[in-house]
Amino acid sequence: MSLIIPRRRRNEINVIPLIDVMVVLVFFLLLAGRFEEARTLNIVPPTADAGGASGTAAGVVIGVDRAGKIYLEGKEISRKGLDAALQAKAAQTPGTEVLIVADEKSLTGAAVGALDAVAKAGLRPRLLTRPTQ
């Protein structure tokens, strides 16, 4: 009989590969989230030769797609809802600049309706255009 008792080797978990995988997953999720935001609305602004660049950032963004649907900050909204939201924004921060992004093939009535709603609320409208190529 032996007096030496064999010691059990303790199992170890190597966490370095787990950390590496988690870092890659976090980067993937961050990048995928940004790409999703960039392509929410499929809008191509019209071209303009005399469009001026503004140094201030817009406080509110309104989008008008090809079908004439109106979007406020990326979420579809009705015309009455847009009027109410812009009135609330004007009461909260008067003089806010509103950027209107209308597709070049959108219905003119929808874009003019958005301009009208901004003007009624007393906010400063600005149309987004792209330079001619």
Image (tube, rainbow, N blue to C red):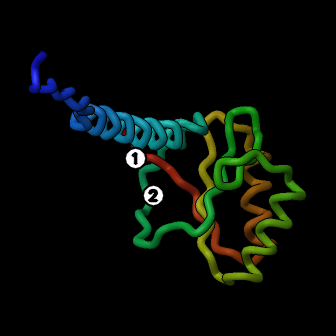
The residue that mark 2 highlights is: 51
Task: Reply above or below: 32 against 87.
Answer: above
Q: Quadrant of residue 99?
A: bottom right
Task: Reply above or below: 17 against 132.
Answer: above
Q: Residue furthest front?
A: 1
Q: Which mark is residue 131?
A: 1
How far across and how far down the image is residue 128, in percent?
Answer: 53, 54
Q: Secondary structure at mark 1?
A: loop
Q: Residue furthest right?
A: 80
Q: Amino acid at mark 1?
A: Pro
Please tell me which residue lies in front, 8 or 86: 8
Residue sitting at x 79%, y 74%: 88
Badge 1 or badge 2: first in the primary sequence: 2
Q: Secondary structure at mark 2?
A: loop
Q: Amino acid at mark 2?
A: Gly
Location of the C terminus by quadrant is top left
Left or right? Give the position of 39 relative to 1.
right
Residue sitting at x 50%, y 50%: 129
Location of the N terminus by quadrant is top left
Q: Quadrant of residue 132?
A: top left
How far across and how far down the image is residue 131, in percent?
Answer: 40, 47
Q: Are marks 1 and 2 in contact (CB under 8 Å)?
A: yes
Left or right? Give the position of 13 relative to 41.
left
Q: Residue furthest top?
A: 1
